[in-house]
Amino acid sequence: MRDKKKGTILVVDDSRVSQTHLIQILQDEYIIHAASGGVEAIQIAKAAKPDIVLLDIVMPQMDGYETLQNLRENVETKDIPVIFITSLDAEADEAKGLRLGAVDYISKPYNPTIVKLRISIQLQLMEQMRTITELSLMDAVSKLPNRRYFEQRLNEEWQRAKSENRQLGILIMDVDKLRTYNAIYGYRQGDECLFNVAKIISDNALLSPGDFAARWIYGGFVVLLQNATGGECNTIGENIRKDVEAAVIKTDTGENAKATISVGANAATPATDECTIEQFISNADSALYLAKELGRNKVVVYS
């Protein structure tokens, strides 16, 4: 049977009585995780990715303020909303919590109705922000993430690959002579062409967890590949190139349109190569321009 609970909440309180009380208030509507201290809370937050953290301030070893700071400094937990739950009722305490990034402040003893309402409001706000963020990071034509999203993810994946001593591969590709295609068939059909190419890229390139594709510029796309050597980048790029070349795109007039792409590829190991993110992209871009100079509809791997 489908779980109808609204979301996941992490309750952090060293008082077993207070923790149990909150769980009783919320357990019928939410999936609940519980922690009795800051260190445990951070570990659970990283693993469970709760929608909201209810965090006590007065705790031994690591208090709520320090726990919140740790959550905000970690890339995996920095965006999780935190509501302070505390017996401290001075305005200075509330102001300090809000300055550190808490989204709300609930005083003990709890009023069950108020607790539920404040959590519900935060979940609604979070869902609205998620929708806005998704729309701002999505390319309307290709239905792939846009360049802004790619650059955010690339920074994260670069640091992760660096810490784990892994290799990353990148493909930058352009639809060949897209302006000519638009002149012949119209911009609406040009958009349809880009949508079809994006689907082929997604079908061929996103083979491993962490691989992702995005719209780059104008008629361009970019793909980041996990643990990919230059040879593997070439293979994936060739599969995409061949499928685009073989695809038939139906036009509004019933004609069968065709398109090709040029692909530039590069691979690097951030931990050992003397290469920045900018160089990583620039080298793939240089390979793309060479592919065009060689007559287009080709894959070139940077070396």
Image: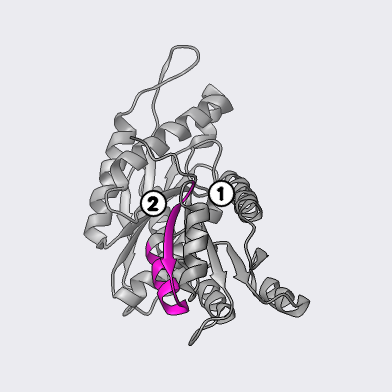
Q: Which quadrant: the N terminus? A: top left
Does residue 249 appear anywhere in the picture?
A: yes
Residue 90 left/right relative to 5: right
The image shows a total of numbered marks equal to: 2
Q: Is residue 257 in the magenta section?
A: no
Mark 1 or mark 2, which is nearer the start of the sequence? 1
**How far is mark 2 from mark 1, CA to CA?**
13 Å
Q: Amino acid at mark 2?
A: Phe
Q: Image quarter for residue 98?
A: bottom right
Residue at image coords 27%, 37%: 242
Q: Return the x and y of residue 210 as percentages of the image width and height.
A: 34, 56
Report the residue marked by disc 2.
212
297 is higher (above) or lower (below) than 147: above
Residue at image coords 58%, 28%: 187
Report the residue marked by disc 1.
137
- The magenta segment: 29-47
Q: Is residue 45 in the magenta section?
A: yes
Judging depth in this view, the residue of 117 and 168 nearest the camera is: 117
Q: Return the x and y of residue 93 as percentages of the image width and height.
A: 71, 78
Q: Which quadrant: the C terminus? A: bottom left
Residue 247 left/right relative to 135: left
Q: Image quarter for residue 182?
A: top right
